[in-house]
Image (spheres, rainbow, N blue to C red):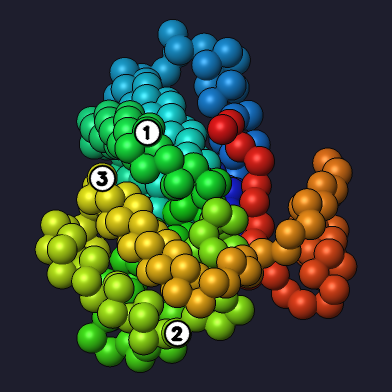
Amino acid sequence: HSRLQLHSLGENFSLRFVEVDREGNSNNKERELPMANLQDITLGISVFTNQNVIAKEKLDDIQRFLQCYECARAMHQLRIQLEASGHPQFQSSEDDLNRRGHMDALSLQEGVHNLKMNLMSWNKRLAEAYETHPRLSFLDSRQLSQFLNRLASAKVGFANLSERDLAELILPYITHCFPDIPFKSVINPALIHSTFNEVLTAHGDDEVPGGELTEESLKFAAYLIYKIAEQAQDEADNQNCYLPLVDACPPEVVNAIGFDESDLHCLFIDLCEGAVPHPSQLYWCGWR
């Protein structure tokens, strides 16, 4: 079982199993071994077990377990990399890696291969998107993944979203993250709704809802930002108004090294003067 770092319960890699006695009977009570226990068990099997006195059938089972463990651990690490890189489908997720319910090294090896291909493909598409649409680089990996997931939800439920609901869903990721876009203090939700509908008509059929997020997701996001920026600029030109929603003062840099989740929460509340910050306002330093 793999649970990623941004999950509310924290990262976890564990083995879940049901004990079976020598007669094949089970009490159907699931047990769980965390990563530390698994490492001790695999070390003990590899180093301290005298394989010469073990029956071949049991030895084969041990080798199969070790293969499955290494593959599952590799899958967990790849999933962490995908989450850290901002892939929208891997944010705060948890998954049972051995879906067939029994030790199956071949399916886990296939899972490792698929995750490697997924990571390579995502990083390639991300690099291409940053080069083609430089404004996307204003978003860090967490903001980008949140923004893409919000857009995916809005695309699926667009017909049932009011103008205000749509604006509240996606606008913070634009007004808080792109200081080069001039915004008035109040933006007309109808304008956002019509702009989203225009972009949806042009790019909305490139992917099936709930399907794999491809480069079309990034194109959709970039084009939407471009169109909203264009509308905001036209409105600013017409009204001779160039007032961004973000403050003109430089951002405050805070050293939060060693802070746990509770400390960070208190820091955010303090910096925002008692208000809970919107996720789009949190910029996490990454490899870029």
Residue 209 figure quarter: bottom left
Dot 1 amino acid type: Glu
Look at mark 2 in the image and give the residue it sits on.
188
Marks 2 and 3 in Cβ contact (< 8 Å): no
Q: Provide the secondary structure element on which disc 2 rests.
A: loop
Of the 4 image quadrants, the one containing the C terminus is: top right
Instruction: Please say if 274 is above or below 145.
Output: below
- Which tag, 1 or 2, sits closer to the chain's start? 1
Provide residue 245's location: percent of width, then percent of height. Answer: 63, 69
Is residue 193 at least partly visible in the picture?
yes
**How many residues crowd around disc 3 within 10 Å: few (fewer than 14), some, or many (20 or more)?**
some
The circle on residue 131 is: 1
Disc 1 versus disc 2: nearer the observer: 2
SS at badge 1: helix
Is the residue marked by circle 2 packed among few (<14), some (14-19), or many (20+) residues within 10 Å? few
Of badges 1 and 3, nearer the viewer stands: 1
Cα–Cα span, label 2 and label 3: 29 Å
Residue drawn at 15 percent across, 63 percent down:
202
Return the mark for residue 6: none
Q: CA distance from mark 1 to mark 3?
A: 13 Å
Residue 38's quadrant in the figure?
top right
* Residue with the mark numbered 3: 215
Q: Position of residue 151 (x, y in %)?
A: 35, 66
Is 105 positioned to the left or the right of 246 in the image?
left
Q: What's under tag 2, amino acid-wise? A: Asn
Mark 1, Cα crowd under 10 Å, few <14 / some 14-19 / many 20+, is few
Of helix, strand and loop, which one carries label 3?
A: helix
